[in-house]
Image (tube, rainbow, N blue to C red):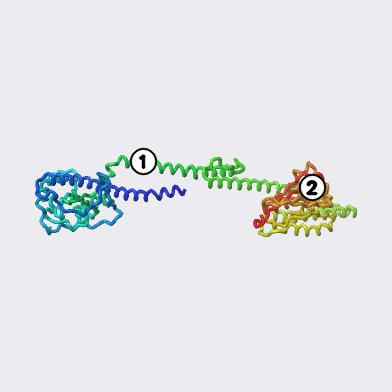
Amino acid sequence: MLVVMLMVLGLPLGGLYFFRIYENELVQQTERELISQSAVLSAAFRQLVRNLPHDDRTYGKLLPALAPADSDYEPITPLLSLINPIQPPRPDAQPAKFPADQFAQKIGLLMRPVLTDTQHITLSGIRLLDMNGTVISGREEVGLSLADIPEIQRALQGDYAGAIRQRISDEPPPPLYSMSRGTHIRVFVAFPVIENRHLQGVIYLSRTPDNILKHLFAVRKKVFVAIFGVLVLVVLLVLLVSATISRPIRELIQQTERIKLGEQKWVEPLKNPVTYEIAQLSQSFASMSHTLAERTDYIRRFASHVSHEFKTPLTSMQGALELLQDHLDTMPSEQRQRFIDNLLADTQRLRQLVTRLLELARADALEPSRQESCLPAVIAALQNRYAERGLQLHFTSLPDKPLAIAPDALDTVLSNLFENSLQHKASCVEITARLNENTLKLSVHDNGTGISPANRNKIFIPFFTTRRNNGGTGLGLEIALSLLKAYGGKIELAESGQGALFVLGLPLSRLSA
């Protein structure tokens, strides 16, 4: 998208920059042509000076000593640019302070046909000046002086000079031509005629640069090719946007529609996401979809288990109450008491079940806090509590690095494990720990009856318990698992020769990791 936006921004700016560069190139091309014409006219001027008889063979104004040329070639590079300020229109010619040299006037007369024929082809304004800046040949201003014009003053010193001046036209330009600055300017060059360090005269030429629109029309085939290239570039950009953004998003929309219609269970990651951001979006959708599907299955199974767990004691209570209602007067007192005891037991079981369900709900919806806990302190508090119930906790040199889990959550997780140990007739629990890169591996190994191979894959299923008759609800491990998940931890059942061995992964605090 950044590339596309930069291209869209660059098109008008590039077009404007292209117009300015192209106009400047047309100005320099005009200056280059005027230099070429001046060089030819200067050569003709010098040749006439050599061939015409005159008394002084060193005709012209002697110039100061010039630096010797590096070679026989002395090219003149165009120097004019539209970046520089445009000078005002050329000043009018003034009366000459000195009459033109007679020999220079003769050369001007001889050069006049050449200048006329040249103007018919080049459309340039041509003036021949003598060594003092007086016009000796041209369509007009002959005999007048242009010596006060800056570029001619430099030429009279023996240096080439040029200028871009405002052009005042008698006719308004066409509307489209007003877009070009070249319509309102004129290029002037002053070329000194020098031989043997003597200034013999000045060639003063001027011409309006080609209009950019006229020039573009002349090369319209190339312009059409450039426009076609830009259109191809735009089409490629559209295809790029469609391939990198639109197509992957449409694929995600199609998957969500299939999920809504029940044709698909969850969103699959895109095979060709093209861009990193779309790949992230695809993975995020897939992860969210899998999480929602798992949560839906969990809620469905949970509802089924809850209904079953509540249905059994409720059915028993209903049957006992119906018997009491129908045979209360004739029922022996011992049997009546037995039914009442069963009702109380079922009521107690339902109460305990509701309590555990609330604990599980709080664990599932827990927002992890930023509290930290110290493992030795939590274990020491639990050691005193369970020693009174006949369960000894054995541990040595536990790491005291801060854990990224709240103390009450860690207490609940360990308490559920120790309760399971008591229910399976354990009298001792061995606790060991080792540090990994970002986690603490905590092993809890008891000496109880353990878990049978047939039940090893069921212990984390909600409501699964082998101690239902002794008040077990089958939610303790599920509560521990939910609490650990909330804080980025985990729990798993490991192999052991005797008793049950649980391995917990507890996250370390970022400051201590």
Residue 364 vs residue 175, the one in the foreground = 175
Q: Quadrant of the C terminus?
A: bottom right
Give the residue number, with chain letter if any, for mark 1. 228
Q: Earlier in the sequence, mark 2 or mark 1?
A: 1
Q: Compared with residue 226, is residue 398 higher up or lower down, i.e. above or below?
A: below
Residue 57 visible, this orientation: yes
Amino acid bearing label 1: Phe
**Horizontal relation, residue 8 to residue 22: left or right:** right
Seen from the viewer's position, the closer of residues 474 and 118 is 118
Mark 2, residue position: 500
As measured in the structure, the alpha-carbon distance from the residue carrying label 2 to the one carrying label 1 is 77 Å
Q: Is residue 211 visible?
A: no
Badge 2, how many Cα within 10 Å: few under 14, some, many 20+?
A: many
Q: Position of residue 117 (x, y in %)?
A: 15, 43
Q: Return the x and y of residue 261 as percentages of the image width and height.
A: 58, 42
Task: Using residue 386 as the reference point, say whether residue 62 is left or right of it.
Answer: left
Relative placement, left or right, of 63 versus 421 is left
Percent coordinates x, y for residue 29 in the rendering: 26, 46
Looking at the picture, how far across and down is residue 12, in whole percent?
37, 50
Going 37% across and 51% down the picture, which residue do you hit? Answer: 13
Q: Secondary structure at mark 2?
A: loop
